[in-house]
Amino acid sequence: MNNTVAVIGGSGLLGSEMVRVLETEGWMVVAPSHGELDILDSEKVTHFFANCSPAYVINTAAYIDVDACESDPVPAWHINALGAGNVARALWQNKRTETKLIHMSTNYVFGESKKQYGEDDLPDPVNVYGETKKVGEELVQAYCVMGNIPYSIIRTSWLYSSLRDTYVDAVAKTLLRGEVFRASSTQFGNLTSADDLARAIVAVCMQPGLPSNKYHLVNSGGDTKEGMSRYDIAVHIADCLGISLSMVENGENPAPGIAPRPKHAVLLNTKTPPLPSWKESLTRYVQAKHNRRE
């Protein structure tokens, strides 16, 4: 049995979680560095997979600085679109029909036309980052279909991890310093634990029989059909820390930035088992990492 998994972007937030979870569950992980595998160099990517035939390839590599993508789109198009296509193209060229490609994408491929998006809804991105990820999805799907390469395109949203500080940690640290945190109540999404996501990828996407398709993997729950706002998240963090909810102020507008953000990009998971509740996962995380005043 082939138990080798290649993780591209293994030093990033999700990639690091994937490597940790895979190794814990007994998989043999190959996580090439950027120097070993530059996804912008199509010849090197093709050569890499000519000499490596893993059971799964998980591509977590991405240029995720949304404002930087907007101000300088070239790196975003190279990494998020062309680089993603190069990985799928290399598997096709090497006839790796026994290798499954799991490509990571984002809720930012959606924007403003709806409040909730299912897996089969048409993308409508509102910024360069979302547009480049949308095209990356299209290239991955096209090459995989042409080459009969099994694939899963996984969209997720608002990741946090113990391996790297994110919005969740910024909220907790601000509140623990005794400062007010201002959060938007008009920007909705799905807060998702990278640990939960990595485990779901192994449990769901790395099992035989799952059809090649797009999937939404996000933590479940949300007090309304709109998902949860950044304000909801900050309030729950304050509650976990035993801090007065008055320390979280309701900011009606999203934080300013160069790139527009989708106000509603809530992902619906209709094709796979639900992930744990976002409140349960966030509570465990906050209590484990931020449960004492420093």
Image (cartoon, rainbow, N blue to C red):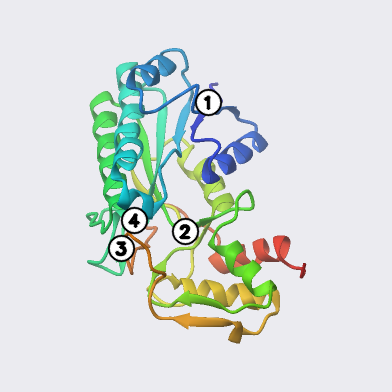
Task: State the image quarter where residue 174 is shown.
Answer: bottom right
Q: Which mark is residue 158?
A: 2
Rounded to the nearest whole Å, what is the CA distance between mark 1 and mark 2? 25 Å
Q: Which residue is mark 3?
A: 260
Q: How many marks?
A: 4
Rounded to the nearest whole Å, what is the CA distance between mark 2 and mark 3? 16 Å
User: Residue shown at 65%/67% (left/top)?
Assistant: 173
Q: Residues within 10 Å of mark 2 (few under 14, many from 20)?
A: some
Q: Residues within 10 Å of mark 3 (few under 14, many from 20)?
A: some
Q: Which residue is mark 1?
A: 32
Q: Which residue is mark 4?
A: 108
**164 relative to 108 in the view: left or right:** right
Residue 111 percent across, percent down from the top left:
28, 62
User: Residue shown at 74%/68% (left/top)?
Assistant: 291
Rounded to the nearest whole Å, what is the CA distance between mark 2 and mark 4? 10 Å
User: From the viewer's perspective, is the residue at label 4 or at label 3 nearer?
Assistant: 3
